[in-house]
Amino acid sequence: MKKSAGFTLIELVVVIIILGILAVTAAPKFINLQSDARASTLQGLKGALQGANALVFSKAAISGVESGDHKDLVIGGSSDLVDTRFGYLASDFDSLNIALDIDLATSGTDSEWLTTAVVNNTDAVATTAIAIYQQGSNYSSSDPTVSCHLLYTPATASGNSPSYQVVKDGC
């Protein structure tokens, strides 16, 4: 008499079905595509803002206004006027909208990106930073540490660079 060791075909099929059900219910918790997409989009926006700031600083250096606070600078056409702080973009809505050329708004509209002014108390200097976040994302002005946004703080002195902080805890 032969002793059989192993699974029968029915047992194998039942185990595969159970593993399939577990995979379908557990996969969304491990594969959070929307959160990763929002965080990646913020990283892309950070890179675009850094690139725009490099170009604005170069233009400010050519124009001789790279060491002044709140100097106007013409970029692009004659009507594209941005405010600079020590050669870099100031944290105001109009300057960022012109330099980045994105669909940016200050309140809940059909725009893709929204902005909120944030007082940033770093290095004992109160500066106005700007939080840029996607329409429909999780942004809380009362607790911005658990939000999904890019915080841009302009340069505070000549020779200083602006700060770019991607907060993706709430994405």
Image (cartoon, helix red, strand yellow):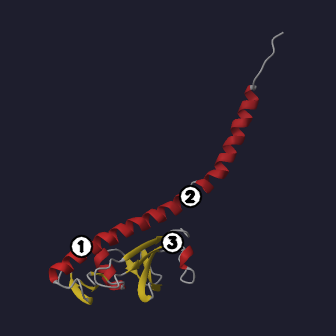
Q: Image point 42% across, 83% down: which residue?
A: 129
Task: Report the side of 12 relative to 135 (left or right).
Answer: right
Q: Secondary structure at mark 2?
A: loop
Can you tell which mark lies on residue 148?
3
Name the residue beneath numbered marker 1.
Answer: 55
Say which label, 1 or 3, has the lower sequence index: 1
Q: Secondary structure at mark 1?
A: helix
Name the residue beneath numbered marker 2.
Answer: 32
Task: Report the side of 34 relative to 62 (left or right).
Answer: right
Q: Secondary structure at mark 3?
A: loop
Q: Image point 71% across, 33% down: which residue?
A: 13
**Cα distance, mark 1 to mark 3?**
27 Å
- Counting from the top left corner in percent of width and height, residue 53 is at 29, 75
Q: Are marks 1 and 2 in contact (CB under 8 Å)?
A: no
**Cα distance, mark 3 to mark 2?**
15 Å
**Cα distance, mark 1 to mark 2?**
35 Å
Residue 87 visible, this orientation: yes
Near mark 1 (Cα within 10 A), the count class, few <14, some 14-19 or many ≥20, is some
**Quarter in which the N terminus is drawn:** top right
Say which label, 1 or 2, has the lower sequence index: 2
- Counting from the top left corner in percent of width and height, residue 100 is at 31, 74
Q: Image point 50% across, 60% down: which residue?
A: 36
Residue 76 visible, this orientation: no
- Amino acid on which the number 3 mark rests in the picture: Cys
Can you tell which mark lies on residue 102?
none
| Front residue of 134 and 10 | 134
Q: Are marks 3 and 2 in contact (CB under 8 Å)?
A: no
Q: In the image as oriented, which residue stretches furthest toward the right?
A: 1
- Amino acid on which the number 1 mark rests in the picture: Leu
Residue 152: quarter of image: bottom left
